[in-house]
Amino acid sequence: MDRKLSSRIVLTCVLVLMLVFPAVKAVDAQTASNYFVTVNPATADSQMYTTVGRNWTVSFEALWSYGDDSGTAIEKATVTVKVFNSKTVAVDTLALNTTAGMVSFNYSSSTVDVLTFTPTKLVTSDGTEYDSELFDAENSVYGLQSESVVVWWDTFHVTLVSSDTDAADVTTVSVNVTYLLLPEEGLTLPEWATYSHQTFLPKTVHDANVTINGVKAEETSEGAFTANVSTWLPTAYIHVEVAQEGWVTAHTGFSFAHNVNRSSWGYTALSGLVLVVAVLTIFFVRRRKDGSKVLSLKNYPILGGVLLAVTSVISLYWGLVGLDSTLHGFDWVPLAMFGMLSFVFGSAASLLLLRKKLQPLVIFAINMPMITNLVGVKSSFDLYGLANPWLLMIVSLVLSFASAVLICNTDELFT
């Protein structure tokens, strides 16, 4: 009985195995995927690296991958390639014609990004469309299989390491220069996949031409550069330019308070403010003897003129900032021009206020310092990602509004 039971168990196991193995093979056969066409990168490696602003050639090869023509090139077809940014958002769609099965095109990015080029559709010369949604259920054949090409458009990244502002009119600046997109451990790519034919790309930048406010910086260690630059403004505006063969030059700006210079400028500004207050006090004390109040309509032009003069001086300061920074590499020519023009217009309008003449021209002139001290400064600072001096900008705006209110309510006093 034991022999018969053992034989039955063995026989049952053999039968089960005989049934299971064919079933497994049948499932494998059903899940194997075939595709009518494939569009893959024309090179072995599908990842490339270059500088922002440079054209890079991207190539794909379109082949029949099912049927009698399997392995042959697809000629006279149109391939749709979608371009995705690093956030997987589609930023462009290209329709490209194949030549002997090849699709090749140049592409460039004006901004730093990692772009992915993915073929999504192929249309043959007879109008037949193949995409990932096409499926022939009878033969278990899908429409399109494709692989993507990834291109890194990178640039230099400059960070401020330290700054020494303890000496008058001089600032010692140290910066660290790296590539923006590269990971800390670097990146390894084939030689042909980089402009410089490097196989390993380090994070830090070595042997670059770095200038700080026009002064050539010394590389103190790998990726670290230092220079002494002259600074006479209360705020140090630092422009760093990084250039390297084959790379688009990068421009970066920094701003920070200059301790010694700020003290000197603070004393000067305070002295000027005290002088203005003293002159106004003497003037209104004399007017008081005549029985006129400080805030009387008769004094509106004088008060408005003083406020306009103050905002004009602020515009002059920004004009000097723009001029000095432009000489050191900043693209702040508009700030310098508008600052100087605002000072001239504002000063001329202040004189017209004292003489109570040409009110329309005076009202127009008020807008010049107001626009410069707010819009001009903000747009210039935003160009380099600098922190806006909101306190000075708001004070200037309030003074401009107060001046405008005073002047616009003195129609009968102007001739």
Image: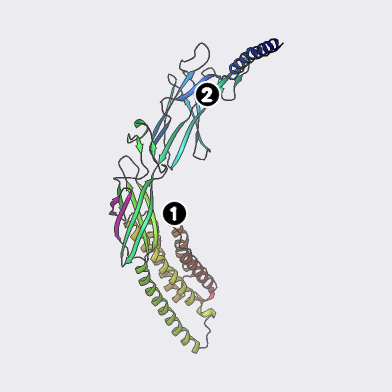
* Mark 1 residue element: loop
Report the span colored magenta.
213-230
The Cα atoms of the two marked residues, 1 and 2, are separated by 43 Å
| Left or right of residue 375: residue 221 | left
Residue drawn at point x = 28 percent, y = 51 percent = 219
Q: Disc 1, disc 2: CB below 8 Å? A: no
* Residue 100 on image: x %, y %: 43, 18
Residue type at the position of mark 1: Gly
**Count of numbered tags:** 2
Single out the mark in the foreground, 1 or 2: 2
The disc, 1 or 2, on the residue closer to the chain's N-terminal end is 2
* Mark 2 residue element: strand
Residue type at the position of mark 2: Gln
User: Which image quadrant is residue 330 in?
Assistant: bottom left
Depicted 343 relative to depicted 209: above or below: below
Numbered mark located on residue 145 in the image: 2
Q: Nearer the viewer, residue 47 or 360?
A: 47
* Residue bearing mark 1: 385
Can residue 323 be spotted in the picture? no
* Residue 282 on image: x %, y %: 44, 85
